Image (spheres, helix red, strand yellow):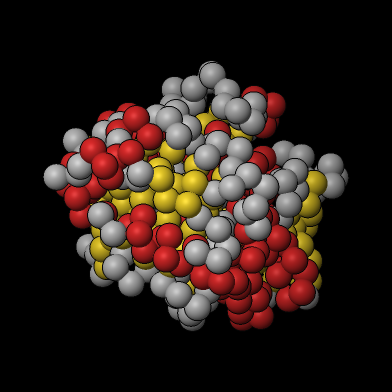
Amino acid sequence: MIGTALQANQISFCEHTVVTSIQEFLAGFDDVFAAVAHKRTLTVAGAAMHVGSNDLCYLEQAQRALATRDTGHKSQCRIAVINADDRLCAMPYWPPHRFREREIEAILSKTPYRLHYFDDLDFWQVFDVDRAIGIQWMASREGYPAWDAGSPLRNFVQWHLGAVDRSLLHGGTLALDGAGVLLAGAGGAGKSSTVLAGIFAGLQSVGDDYVLVDAGKRAACPVFDTLKQDEAGLRRLGQWDHAAIPKAANWQGKHQFYLPDVTDGALASQIDLKAILLPHLTHGDQTSVTPVDAKSAFIALAPSGVTQIHCDRPRLFSVAGKIARLLPAYRLDLGTEPDEITAVLRQFLRTLH
């Protein structure tokens, strides 16, 4: 049983004690996980993620957003999602203005421990890679970042599934008969609208925001089913009145919906990557595909993921670099008509078989 003394305790973190503080924070994990009221097992990219929380709504949203596929699992991890009001463990504390993320990442890189701390919200994610256990601790039940609803537990997915040749990358995917492309680019480049145009035209996808890329296998697996687009984009695609797309916008002013609700047929559990596409909005009449170098592909792939996936940046850089070297890359200059764009994409995908 978790005692009153433990509930009242505070574990102080700093750059000098971060390893021992993590060990202390996770020492009572088994009791914490046993004490939460609700649990879900979510099979994501071959990993069974056992997630527990007293907040059933959070678990249901995680189950909705994570790309759960009944493909069996090769590994397991346990994650407890708790907050201060649960009083299930000592409260973590980092002195104000002292958290330097890159320094902590370097310290922890030689250990089995991973940590993300978002000081604006007092939001913590702590993980032991060797034991495959982690705690997401929040100051309140609603104390998670706005973007968490679209990609919940994102860092835990990276920390558990990351490997020498495998990492989450920030990119979209489209495929035909299992062979496809990884689309990458900065916000506003047209990546999401291109992926959505392909999905609504019947092409396969394993995700638009984050996908798990295995550079050794040249493959991508789904991690999140979340899709997002603004009203103007949905109207251009002729999907503004789609029954599965809510009229209420999220914190970004975008409408959030889910791949299984807008996909005909079976959902792909993996696609073979044959090329990297770098979309660009040119407002020209026709869509065109032009070869570019590996450096351009790497620059499009790496920066956005590095700012949004924490305490594992070297792995992300390594995988982005390797997949950029292995696959041919092309600039995709986008026309203005979704049907024309998808026709060009479909023809390009046929050439990859």
- Horizontal arrangement in the rendering, residue 22 relative to residue 181 (left or right): left
Looking at this view, is 157 or 211 the one in front?
157
Residue at the (33%, 38%) spot, across then down: 8
In percent of width and height, residue 55 lies at: 30, 31
Residue at the (63%, 44%) spot, across then down: 96
Q: Is residue 213 visible in this depiction of the protein?
A: no
Q: Is residue 337 above or below residue 92?
A: above
In percent of width and height, residue 258 lies at: 44, 37
- Horizontal arrangement in the rendering, residue 227 relative to residue 327 (left or right): left
Q: What is the number of callouts on the image? A: 0
In percent of width and height, residue 209 lies at: 56, 49
Q: Quadrant where the N terminus lies?
A: top left
In percent of width and height, residue 117 lies at: 54, 50
Looking at this view, is 344 or 218 the one in front?
218
- Horizontal arrangement in the rendering, residue 335 relative to residue 164 (left or right): right
Looking at this view, is 352 or 228 the one in front?
228
Q: Is residue 324 visible in this depiction of the protein?
A: yes
- Horizontal arrangement in the rendering, residue 114 relative to residue 29 (left or right): right
Residue at the (36%, 55%) spot, across then down: 25
